[in-house]
Amino acid sequence: MKKIKFILIMIFLCLLLNNSFAVNYDINEKLIAVILPFSSAFKGIAVEQQNAINLFLEENNKYQIVYKDSKSDAIGAVEAFNELLKMEKPPFAVISCASWVASALHPLAAKEGIFHIVIASANFQRSIPHHTIRFTIDGSQEEKQLANYLTNFNNIAIYYMNNSYGIGWQKNIKDNLGNKVGKEISYDPMKKDFIQDLEIIAETTPDALVLLSASKAAIIAKEAREMGIEAQFVGTRPIERPELLKEAEFTNGLVYTYPTYDQANPMLKKYKARYGMEPTIFGVEAYESIKCLVAASEDTDKSAEKLFNWFANKVITGALGEVHFDENGDAHYPYMYKQIVNGEFVTAEFQYKLLLQSAKQEIDNTFSIMDSAVKQSAKNLSKSGIIGDEVTKELESLFKKTEFAYDVVTVDKSGIIRSVYPSEYSNIIGSNIMNQPQIIKLHKTQKPVVSEAIETVEGFTGFDLEYPVFDDEKKFIGSVSVLTQPDFFEKVISQKISNFPVEIWIMQKDGTIVYDVNDEEIGLNIFEDEIYAPYKSLKEVAKNMAVEPSGEGKYFFLDTKMNETKLKKLIWTTISLHGTEFRLALSHISNDL
Ligand code: COI
Ligand code: CYT
């Protein structure tokens, strides 16, 4: 049934498209079209976007805007677009809202050579490269972050709006957490009463109910709670609508993912003064899109190609904060968790602990895989000793098992490196590392060791994990080692914290920074190095970190670009392996979100 409907829509779209093939336009270089879902379940969103665009135009009236109503689906959007083509002079650019509109208009606008910007379009299918610029982050990116939270639950129900936004999300969650999803039901966004669906969901007693909804989440939450559904409500970007605060009694506690933007941007105050309420991400995104489009138009000949190229691979700082456009035209910026607490949309405090824990877990897992590989090699080397062809084979296999290894070596019982893999580092064979602290310890204890940051014979600051090797008679004959570089931490952690406006750094108990996003700080000591001298509060925090395995604090230090001094909040925990401890810290600028 769905398939037939899809085919009919496609035929209809093709007919509409064909009608406009022959026309040759004279384009209006002062006119921008904005296609929004005014007559739909998303009217509130459309009005907010329109308000934000008008706010910008009040200050910059070089361009005229023609607003069109996409109504509730792709067909409505294509009709609106075709009306533009019938104008004596069609607009040079079009901004459109919603995923289903984005995917439908994108090939049409490309065909007509009209530049296209899409907003509020998390699930957008590009068919023609280098044409459309998207300000919304892809749903699959947001889902990675939501999944971090959803893994805490075991029986997830999904209630989703029946359009490409809801369907795209439902697929994303199923693909990644399918084994936890107990029930999924879609609903028509025009629907007013959700009781029947919710009764079916209630029967499965979910512990989390994901609502892929906008303002309708207010009624859904109310009806769900009234029938006794106790599940944690979980949402995504479009759920932050004013209607939810009117039903705070039922929506309090909702947790959702949300893009970050510049909280101090003057646009927010102006919008509030003008319209009596704060804008949501929809308004901020709409404002930023028209602002950038106007800037791009001033800099170019307004052709679709030049306008696209103006955005691609650019970093733009504005109301959305720092936005990175990739070569495909997609925007990237951080996402966070928000929550409804006491009838307000607020930044969820829990996210920092969650992020720190998941970074720790990722490092622990990686260490543990590396540890068992080295342990196994040490056993295998009992037979072959620490030099010879068999050893090279063993080192090769160890290297291939340990994703983040820089190199792997064997060391004899007098502390001389005897074999190395890969062979390109063979210049270190023969180096004496007897005076490195971890080797001293290993020789003394004959137990596995992990070094603190050491100056390696390879020539960089690194970390060494070593297991002792014993021969068949259990006599100590040397050791086997895996060496990693500090960026090993970055590679492991970045998958867990990417897109969050937080910094992770790692300190040894002596105050040496062994990992920081800012390369220049790696290897510096908070208690000793010059650049930390003016930051007493940081030294205080570091003193606590040196003695306490976990804790929290506040300090002043430079932002990640080392420009301005900011108040930062921090929490830390400990990573420990074979008795060596590292403090893993997460800090964030206290008003960054
Ligand atoms: C999206 O498609 O990403 C949206 O946010 C659409 C919105 C009207 C619910
Ligand atoms: N290098 C290495 N120490 C070093 O300097 N590969 C192991 C231990």
Image: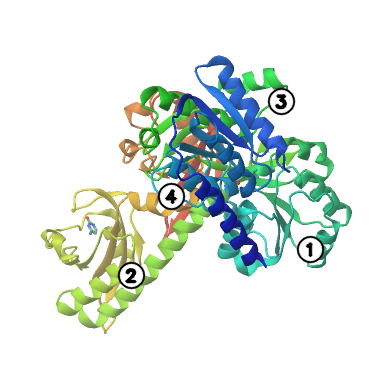
Q: Nearer the viewer, residue 318 or 74?
A: 74
Instruction: Pick whichever of labels 3 and 1 is earlier in the sequence.
Output: 1
Instruction: State the CA–CA distance, disc 1 to disc 4.
Output: 36 Å
- In the rendered view, tell whether residue 378 sits above or below residue 466: below
Q: Amino acid at mark 1?
A: Ile
* Secondary structure at numbered mark 4: helix
Q: Is residue 405 visible?
A: yes
Q: Give coordinates of residue 217: x percent, y percent.
A: 76, 47
* Secondary structure at numbered mark 3: loop
Tag 4 residue: 494
* Secondary structure at numbered mark 1: helix
Instruction: State the CA–CA distance, disc 4 to disc 3.
Output: 36 Å
Tag 1 residue: 201
Tag 3 residue: 277
Instruction: Pick whichever of labels 1 and 4 is earlier in the sequence.
Output: 1
Tag 2 residue: 401
Q: What residue is drawn where x is 49% and y is 17%?
A: 62
Instruction: Pick whichever of labels 4 and 3 is earlier in the sequence.
Output: 3
Q: Amino acid at mark 4?
A: Ser
Q: What residue is drawn where x is 19% and y is 63%?
A: 415
Instruction: State the CA–CA distance, disc 3 to disc 2.
Output: 56 Å
For the residue carrying disc 4, how many other residues have a C-alpha within 10 Å: few (<14), some (14-19), or many (20+)? some
Could you tell whether 280 is left or right of 57 in the image? right
Of the two numbered discs 3 and 2 in the rendering, the one whose residue sits closer to the viewer: 3
Could you tell whether 149 is left or right of 434 in the image? right
Q: Give coordinates of residue 232: x percent, y percent.
A: 74, 54
Q: Is mark 2 within 8 Å of ligand 2?
A: no
Q: Amino acid at mark 2?
A: Lys
Q: What residue is drawn where x is 45% and y is 31%?
A: 539
